[in-house]
Amino acid sequence: MQILRDMARTASEISYVTAASYRFGKTVQKMTIERFLVELSKKMLGIYIRGVIITRTNFQSHNSG
């Protein structure tokens, strides 16, 4: 860990790097959440479609026999 007085850069340069890192971290976090929501939506759609297929199959088998 470096102490600010021993660093060659000015305080404004340090705060700029910190702000950029914060923004980059937030961007990565946002992309991760968006990707998760897309994958979750795909899974839920697949579960819904399977449920519809099972329901129709059960309905047809009960009505045909």
Image (cartoon, rainbow, N blue to C red):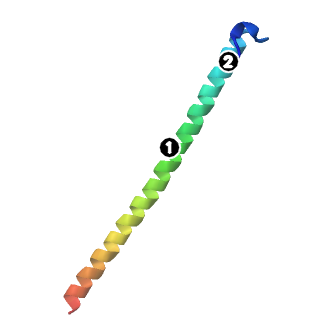
- In the rendered structure, the answer to whether residue 27 lies left or right of residue 7 reads left
- In the rendered structure, the answer to whether residue 52 lies left or right of residue 5 reads left
- Name of the residue lying farthest toward the bottom: 65
- Name of the residue lying farthest toward the right: 8
- Evaluate if marks 1 and 2 touch, with contact meaning CB atoms under 8 Å apart: no
- In the rendered structure, the answer to whether residue 37 lies left or right of residue 49 reads right
Q: Which mark is residue 5?
A: none
- Name of the residue lying farthest toward the front: 1
**Residue type at tag 1:** Ile
Q: Which mark is residue 16?
A: 2
Residue 11: image location, x then y, percent:
69, 9
Residue 39: image location, x then y, percent:
49, 55
Identify the image quadrant of residue 51. bottom left
Tell me which residue sits at (20%, 87%) in the image.
Answer: 63
Does dot 1 land on a helix, a strand or a loop?
helix
Other residues around mark 1 within 10 Å, as few (<14) / some (14–19) / many (≥20): few
Does dot 2 land on a helix, a strand or a loop?
helix
**From what the image shows, is residue 57 above or below residue 17?**
below
Residue 24: image location, x then y, percent:
62, 32
Tell me which residue sits at (25%, 87%) in the image.
Answer: 61
Identify the image quadrant of residue 49. bottom left
In the rendered structure, which disc, 1 or 2, sits on the residue that comes first in sequence? Answer: 2
Q: Give whichever of 62, 3 is nearer the camera.
A: 3
Residue under numbered circle 1: 33
